[in-house]
Image (spheres, rainbow, N blue to C red):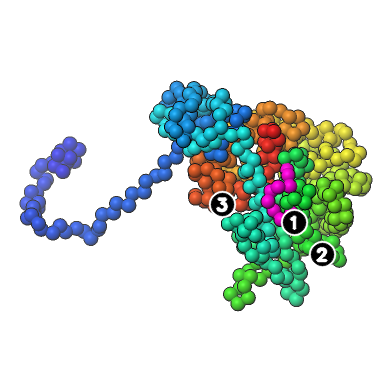
Amino acid sequence: MLCMLLLSGCGSVSELSFDTLQVGSEGEELTTLGMSPEFNYEVPESLPSVLVDQAGYARESDKEAFFRGESLPDTFTVVNAKNGQTVFTGQIEQREADQESGLQISYGDFTALKASGTYYIQAAMVGQSYPFKIEENPYEELYHTALKKYYYNRCGLTLSSELAGEEARNACHSREAQLKDQAEVELDVSGGWHVDEMGSKDVSKGCGTANYLLTAFELYPDTFNDEVGIPESGNEIPDVLDEVKYEIDWLLKMQDAKSGAVYAGVSSMDSKSSGYLLYVDGINMNATIQFAATLAKFSYLYQSYDRAFATQCLQAADRAYRYAGKYLEDVTPEEYFHAAAELYRATGNYGYHNVVKTYLLENLVTDMQNDFVFWGCVTYMSTKQKVDVGLCGDVMKILMQEGERIAANAQCSGLLVSMKEENNGSAELLRDITRLTVVDHVITNHEYAMVLQNHLHYILGRNLQSISYFDGVGSRNYIDIDESLGVMNQIDLNAELVLMMSAIMEELK
């Protein structure tokens, strides 16, 4: 201490009183100020600096790993995880710092490696990556997993161990539900998909989910089969349509038989004396007009499988649309436009067409980030009914501009995705990529196809946190960190994931 004081220039030797320093005898108990030392040091988690898709890469696809850090070696190696042999050596190419994170992100290309197997990447100074596979199509099983997620979310159905495995359970919420405003009125609202852990069901969220699944089927029908492993598998109807029909059957129960209006959803309350009590939320105009759009879309795509049921759905859609038309102050113009577009394609009625044209003429710069605008525009461009060619051209131009924006943002990102890392933006990422999926379907652009694949790589672990947001995939999975980060446990985001994967599955064929 004396030396420290002398060196620091604080105080002098004369100010120190050596009389105050006492030395205890050997073995004397050490006294303290009542504070016990603690050594609970938390070791910060070490994340790999080599970022890969933890599911893997298709044999014939482009393959890149990312390296973060400013001091990097010139080369990297790909190592066979089973025998430790180096199978490929490549160059690490420098990129500019990522604009969003400020981190230096470089990359290494190993596209030339096509042999199937399990590998990891290592490089001097930065270590190694998590393991990954190279195979013909590493996403096919994952695609079915994403589709089957809706079966696990089914309400009012016993899930057998044969089909559901660890997700097997008895039927839930099978009792009738009470109207919130009229407890004496009970309704059968069994069926549909849960939207949260409480077993709630929501018309708007269910409609949005169905819209994305139906869009995926409409654009990429050949990627869907009848073998997902749900009770309806083998009935010669694509399982994605069977799954949506399970939700549609519930949506029909949510429509008031007299007026055509639609209840908002079903909520549950845990009562200690009576168990779970179910309540039907009141009539809601947003739910009513969204119901109209989704039922019309489903009827159009389902008519070749069951014309009678498709007709029932179309009639229900028309009744909901007419009811909502009486309360337009409670309906957004975008929702009304979307419903009119779906009903026009399904019926050819010019009353619906006039609503579509009026909206597009009054909104020449449409907001493609709005789901209702997006769905309505895609449907209008794909209808076989007579359309306004000029308006269709304008819509296509706006959609193409949106695709260019997304692709450009991805190109400027060190991670090659069109989102901000700090937003933890799976929702933002997926919303963007659904738009690009449609654009790529229209013009089949290799650059766009690569952007789509890069976004899937991101979801599967090639991100700064090395988190796989896909259930059951990867050495570092979101479920072990924060369940709210998941994509597949949110039915609407999972549907957008299905649409993106449909385009990639088509590309890999």
Left or right? Give the position of 56 relative to 192.
left
- Distance, label 1 to label 3, CA atoms, is 26 Å
Q: Which mark is residue 479?
A: none
Element on which disc 1 rests: helix
Say if 326 sits above or below 347 in the image: below
Which of the two discs, 1 and 2, sits closer to the camera? 1
- Distance, label 2 to label 3, CA atoms, is 34 Å
The residue beneath circle 3 is 484
Left or right? Give the position of 172 relative to 399.
left
- Dot 2 crowding, Cα within 10 Å, few <14, some 14–19, many 20+: few
Quarter the C terminus occupies: top right
Of residues 122 and 225, the one nearer the viewer is 225
Q: Position of residue 76 (x, y in %)?
A: 46, 26
Pointers 1 and 3 in contact (CB under 8 A)? no
Element on which disc 3 rests: helix
Q: Is residue 101 magenta?
A: no
